[in-house]
Amino acid sequence: MRPELLNPLFRPITSLGGVGPKVALALRRLIGGAEADEPPRVVDLLFHLPAALIDRRNQPGIALAPEGAIVTLKVRVDRYQKPPRGNRRVPYRIYCHDETGEIALTFFHANDAWLEKQLPVGETRYVSGRVEWFNGKPTMVHPDHIVEEADFSSLPLIEPVYPMTAGLARKSLARIVGEAVESVPALPEWLDRKFVAKHSWPDFLSALTQTHNPSGPGDLDPASQHLSRLAYDELLASQLALAVLRLHHRKSAGKSRPGSGELKAKILAALPFSLTASQRQALDEIEADLASSERMLRLLQGDVGSGKTVVALLAAATAIEAGAQAALMAPTELLVRQHASTIAPIAEAVGLRVAVLTGREKGREREAILSSLADGTIDLLLGTHALFQGSVSFRDLALVVVDEQHRFGVHQRLALTSKGSASDVLVMTATPIPRTLVLTYYGDMDVSRLSEKPAGRRPIETRAVPLDRLSEVVERIRAAIDSGAKGYWVCPLVEESELLDVAAAEERYNALGEALGPVVGLIHGRMKAPERDRAMENFRAGATKVLVATTVIEVGVDVGDATIMVIEHAERFGLAQLHQLRGRVGRSDRPSVCLLLYKGPLGPVARDRLSIMRETEDGFRIAEEDLRLRGGGEILGTRQSGMPGFRIARPEIHGALMEAARDDARFFVETDAELAGERGRALRLLLYLFGRDEAIKLLRAG
């Protein structure tokens, strides 16, 4: 049960003054809601923070008010100039003066009685708003505030500006948020007091109040003391929830599964290359986890072409040697088939029984696979999310390998591990993720990192080429394919629309087909699976030499003798995506080239991206630069900027706090796993405030 202390914050916003059904609907559009059919709660408003502020402290006098500036003026009301009767398009003007000059206060569609009450002739008023000059005369259209001389103290000289939506007035939103903040009760301190003192941070309520009532621009600086405090609270709530998830995962019965090493030795002997040092180290860490009685939850990070699939296969071999089964799950059928083509020849050579299960396997074929899984005939199953389905059951699933995990939710991960008793989990990603984001999204996991490319891989020459040299590029491609080369031509992202992306790809396919002949193939996400497979097979076998593609080839496509990558309108892609696409070439000992076709003039961010791509192939450096340029959302496959799931914390500013939050959360879970002590009870409040109360359900479940 949620602590009673928090009840005022979990009531619906319709309980606040002036929030009827229409305003509640507008607020729901702006800040979301607890459930699909519920209005937002008061707590949801607390973290809708100001994006800017209006400074009304400037009181220069009428004649000295700069064009376009927001000012506050003390004026005497002189006369009215009403619009002609029946002509509502002419504004209502009220002329006022101070010792420096005269100004017209201008109102459209005015209510006469209201204006005469607000601005009676002969009275002094303070007005605040934006001054504009026409033909040497100043005017203020619809002043934001009009107050009597005696009420000057009620005029907000510093006014927070919130992100807005249609159907809400700025003043109304500020008042509603103010009422929400006033309803926050005095809460016990959940942070270590010495830690708070070291950073000179205020308590939670003071930090929240100061943010919503800024006294100057510095108060909205994300690095300010009160915003840093709130960011740390948010990070700690996230890390605490992950630490509880990790504890719950490990407490749920694990099983020691040390391998004999026989199958592993056969696979190593069958490989046409030897493992890199970081592959060997990752494998040692995974084998130690499998031999332990605690459940494994490990992230294997490796750049494009660093050999993650081989590590996953060797890990699966250890589980199979122990008499159990393994499953490898990937987000797309294309990627599953790619893994299958890499693994199948090795599996055949060493006697490993492998099957593929996607949405395509139906009828008797599917029944046969399910039967062989249940009786243990199949050692390793490769598949898509079809592996989650209730009809799929294993005899003894020991290891689950999840590829490109950021495309799966945590719930899906848990669903797959529930297929086995005490299954160990290995998560792989080819997206190099900056350390800050690893801690943020994979804080419940141990991390292994593949930092080298396999021996024999050559660097990829990367060049940026303006699109007006397209015909030269096509001629270069012609010469290269005449000499036996193969290449990809990736078409641009168009307005976030898969349909338009496909149209652009088909247009480029037709144009290249006319220029180069029948050696051009096409692949995109709206093709049926057999068509896509056929296009890939034709390219792999050399029936086609140039494969025009949308970003469907971004992950997992592996054609070793492809050595040319052309990315059209490269300025539209994020750094991480450019790096992933470039990684489709350079997978052999042949020299490879990546051409980044761009349309000028380039903005500063696009110029930086292309420059970084030319400078380095180090995916981890590229990931850090991507975080700097664009925020964490793009890196993890979600389109918004900043850190997905976070409203206050920003990785480029609060990254150092993430480490402290992770350590604090882990220490706390180790010393008070039930969050039952004085500080533990306060931390439960924190989890509720930031919507991480799933962790409390796990604590209750034991």
Image (cartoon, helix red, strand yellow):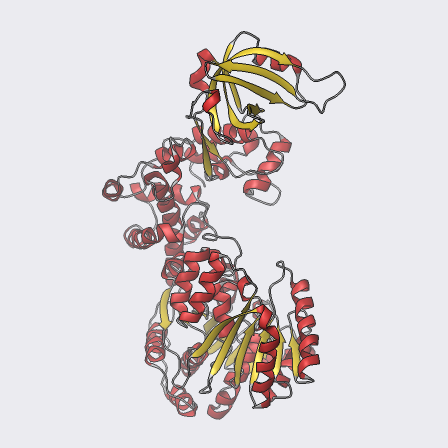
- Seen in the picture, residue 241 relative to 626 is either above or below; the reply is above
Q: Is residue 394 above or below residue 144?
A: below
In the rendered image, which quarter contains the C terminus?
bottom left
> Is 422 in front, or is 11?
11
Is 648 or 364 nearer to us in this picture?
Answer: 648
Q: Quadrant location of residue 538?
A: bottom right
Residue at 45 percent of width and 47 percent of height: 693
Reply above or below: 283 against 105.
below
Residue 124 seen anywhere in this rendered image of the structure: yes
Q: Is residue 426 above or below residue 71?
A: below
- Residue at image point 40% right, 89% down: 273
What percent of the width, then of the height, locates residue 657?
A: 32, 51
Q: Position of residue 21 (x, y in %)?
A: 63, 32
Name the residue rendered at 60%, 66% in the picture: 492
**The one of 556 and 73 positioned closer to us in this rendering:** 73
Q: Position of residue 405 (x, y in %)?
A: 48, 66
